Image (cartoon, rainbow, N blue to C red):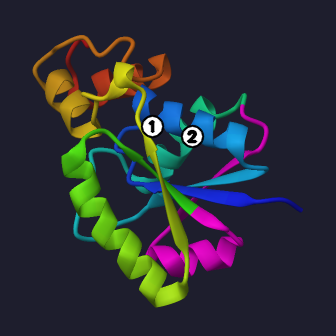
Amino acid sequence: MGLTALCPGTFDPVTNGHLDIIGRTSESFDSVVVGVLENPSKQPLFGLDERVAMLREACVGLLNVRVDSFTGLLVAYAKEQGADVIVKGLRAVTDYESEIQMAQMNHRLAGVETLFMPTNPKWSFLSSSLVKEVGKFGGDVTGLVPDAVRDRLRDRLEVSA
């Protein structure tokens, strides 16, 4: 059966930094579930189905990766998926400060461990929010997101990215 990791996130949109973490996780675990969060308190640019579709397309070459969606508590979803650990990418100390509290709460609630994977320095500046901001003002996001995501972003924002 092997170990299963869960890589959760909003992925609005998926970036090459996300894909780096997912890809590296897939090399270390037998199975990876990428859980796309539907968070009612956020107003994403892309709907849940679009985010799932973009991730499925981007992860097509990763045979041990499955993309799914969820709402509610992360630990409940992790247990439902049979995940042994949650894997979170960290870009900077500020990410750690917020993620450590969530990891400790998840452990307290359900005994689920969280592993932190440092982001490749190549992507340490990259976030979905920054990609959307650059795209919104007509900046070129080529090389920061998969080409299909770049095209969807350009279409959604009706600018030339």
The residue lying at 29 percent from left, 21 percent from top is 154
Across and down, in percent, residue 5 comes to 64, 57
Q: Looking at the image, which residue sits at the far left? A: 137
Q: Is residue 110 above or below residue 114?
A: below
User: What amino acid type should be assigned to the residue bearing mark 1?
Assistant: His
The residue lying at 51 percent from left, 38 percent from top is 21
* Residues drawn in magenta: 62-85
Q: Pointer 2: what residue?
A: 22
> Could you say which is closer to the camera, residue 80 or residue 26?
26
The residue lying at 66 percent from left, 68 percent from top is 83
**Number of residues whose C-alpha sits closer than 10 Å to that of mark 2, classed few (under 14), some (14–19) or many (20 or more):** many
| Residue 118 seen in the figure | yes
Q: Quadrant of residue 42?
A: bottom left
Magenta includes 158?
A: no
The residue lying at 22 percent from left, 32 percent from top is 132
Element type at mark 2: helix
Magenta includes 70?
A: yes
> Could you say which is closer to the camera, residue 88 or residue 50?
88
User: What amino acid type should be assigned to the residue bearing mark 2?
Assistant: Ile
Across and down, in percent, residue 77 comes to 56, 75
Q: Quadrant of the N terminus?
A: bottom right
Across and down, in percent, residue 18 comes to 45, 37
Q: Pointer 1: what residue?
A: 18
Q: Which mark is residue 128?
A: none
Marks 1 and 2 in Cβ contact (< 8 Å): yes
